Amino acid sequence: MPVNKTALILSAHAADFVWRCGGAIALHQKLGYDVTVACMSFGERGESAKLWKQEGMTLDKVKSTRRNEAENAAAALDVHDIQFFDLGDYPLEFDRDAKYKIVDLIRKVQPDFMMSHSKYDQYNTDHMHMTQIALETRMIAQAWGHNPGEKVLGAPQLYLFEPHQTEQMGWKPDVFLDITEVWDKKRAAIECMQGQEHLWNYYTNVAENRGNHFRRNSGGMSGGRPAKYAEGFETVFPICRDEL
């Protein structure tokens, strides 16, 4: 029986995977991939202002609400598996045990590709910290001397998804992914994130703008694919091809 291809999304907070790569998740699930999402925190301190403004709110209530939102969004995207590390946010911190837990997950999933945040984010250092850890744990997962006898990781591409203010963060997309056929799934997932309703239309506009970029870069008026919605990504490692 053939084994499905896999992908791993390392998301700093419980909503990040929705805004930034929800289309990629839904599309690859439709293509037969098993996509695993790992949320390092619930975004309970820094990304839940709407919840904290409610009278009688507690940290546990915020976490529970955010987890429920993320699980509903994952279901809307047909996510294969979603995991919550509950490491806290603002700041998001990783000790050695947390890093090794991520390494264990990477080796278990054996992803054909990985995704995480931009390399730099001065507005949310949790994001760029997550990407540094993604690089570090990817490296450890490749090491034959780490837990010898386990299957080591190959060399999956790490795609960096779009930050909130791209022009401030040095993020430069070199891949545009047409997500038009799964846009309804992404929009449904977006609307699961009730705690951040102010971002719903923002990320709809981002997808429309990236759709324009896809059309332009796929041929424009000379035969480009009429993508309405797209997502942009920046690759970290060289892409190896036998033919251009």
Image (cartoon, rainbow, N blue to C red):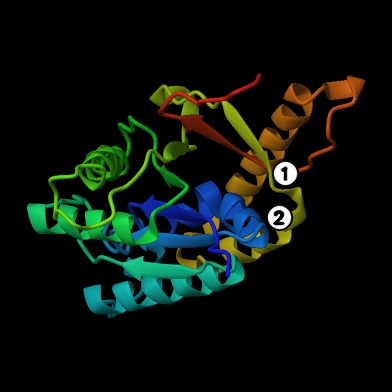
* Amino acid type shown at disc 2: Trp
Q: Is residue 199 visible?
A: no
Give the x, y percent position of residue 179.
69, 48
Q: Earlier in the sequence, mark 1 or mark 2?
A: 2
Q: Is residue 62 visible?
A: yes
Q: Quadrant of the N terminus?
A: bottom right
Above or below 5: residue 163: above
Specify the label residue 183 is tagged with: 2
Above or below 20: residue 157: above
Q: Residue at x 41, y 22 (%)?
A: 170
Helix, strand or loop under label 2: helix
Above or below 49: residue 120: above
Q: Quadrant of the C terminus?
A: top right
Q: Residue at x 46, y 32 (%)?
A: 165
* Residues at discs 1 and 2 in contact (Cβ within 8 Å): yes
Give the x, y percent position of residue 206.
62, 40
In the image, is 30 to the left or to the right of 51? right
Helix, strand or loop under label 1: loop
In the image, is 199 to the left or to the right of 128? right
Q: Residue at x 25, y 56 (%)?
A: 102
* Amino acid type shown at disc 1: Tyr
Q: Residue at x 90, y 20 (%)?
A: 222
Give the x, y percent position of residue 147.
14, 55
User: Residue 51: which quarter of the image?
Assistant: bottom left
As drawn, which residue projects farthest toward the right?
Answer: 222
Reading the image, the residue beneath label 1 is: 229
Give the x, y percent position of residue 108.
33, 62
- What is the tally of numbered marks visible in this picture? 2
